[in-house]
Image: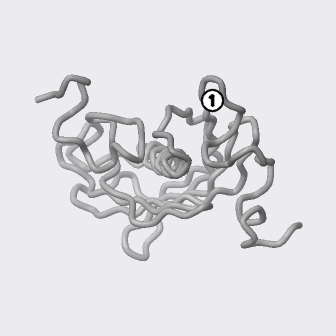
Amino acid sequence: MTNSDDRAWPPHEMDEWVPHRGPMSLLDRVEHCDASSIVATLRVPADGLFGGPDGVPAWVGIEYMAQTVAAWSGARARAGGGSPRIGFLLGSRRYEARVPAFAVGAELRISAQCELVGENGLGAFDCRITLGERVLATARVSVYEPPAEGAAHGMPGQGDNRETTPARERDGEGEKR
């Protein structure tokens, strides 16, 4: 069943966090989100878009990470009175998966720590996927979010004082190097 906007009904919990819809909305919920980090979770589905007899291939972890970053950006947009907008995964560095696949039914935690946000909309995030205390995958993810029509460049929620500074330093949680 769909409503007049052709969106899935009932709405998915993640609809307020990410622009992804339908089978491409892969996360289940956000556990924590602040100015420089986010933690999202998902239960690996048996019948999902990427599922197979051995689970979900580990390379899908890059998309889990990218959607977690999108949820962080969506939270910042909502805090500024907007809504989640489309962004782009530009690439990743050192994606390392310690398993060939994520087992069906596994409750994964995906965390992303903002390391850099530029006034031009480019960002870098250190990400990891864990199952309990076990780290299953890690990567540094590079993203780009185009400016809203008629707005300045940059990730939402940054205001007019956007700068290319690691988020921990900007938010007073780290030291200048």
Find disc 1 in the rendering and name its residue.
Answer: 146
Find residue 34 and report its image quarter. Answer: bottom right
Tell me the amino acid under the disc marked 1: Pro
Horizontal and vertical percent for residue 36? 62, 61
- Using the image, determine if residue 91 lies above or below residue 56: above
Q: Estimate the x, y position of residue 41 in percent, counting from the top left.
A: 36, 60
Colouring style:
one colour
Front position in the image: 1 or 137:
1
Residue visible at 80% across and 48% down in the picture: 163
Task: Give the left or right position of residue 114, taking residue 137 as reference.
Answer: right
Identify which residue, 122 or 49, lies in the foreground: 122
Return the x and y of residue 134 as percentages of the image width and height. 43, 72
* Quarter where residue 102 is shown: bottom left
The residue at 45%/42% (across/down) is 63
Which residue lies at the image location 25% right of the left edge and 45% below the top edge?
12
Image position of 40 (left or right of 113): left
Q: Callout 1: 10 Å neighbours few (<14), some, many (20+)?
A: some
Taking the image as shown, residue 140 lies to the left or right of residue 102, namely right
Please name whichever residue, 144 or 56, is drawn nearer the observer in this view of the structure: 144
Kindly identify the residue that appears in the image at 53 percent across and 45 percent down.
77
Helix, strand or loop at label 1? It is loop
Q: Quadrant of the C terminus?
A: bottom right
Direction left: furthest residue: 1
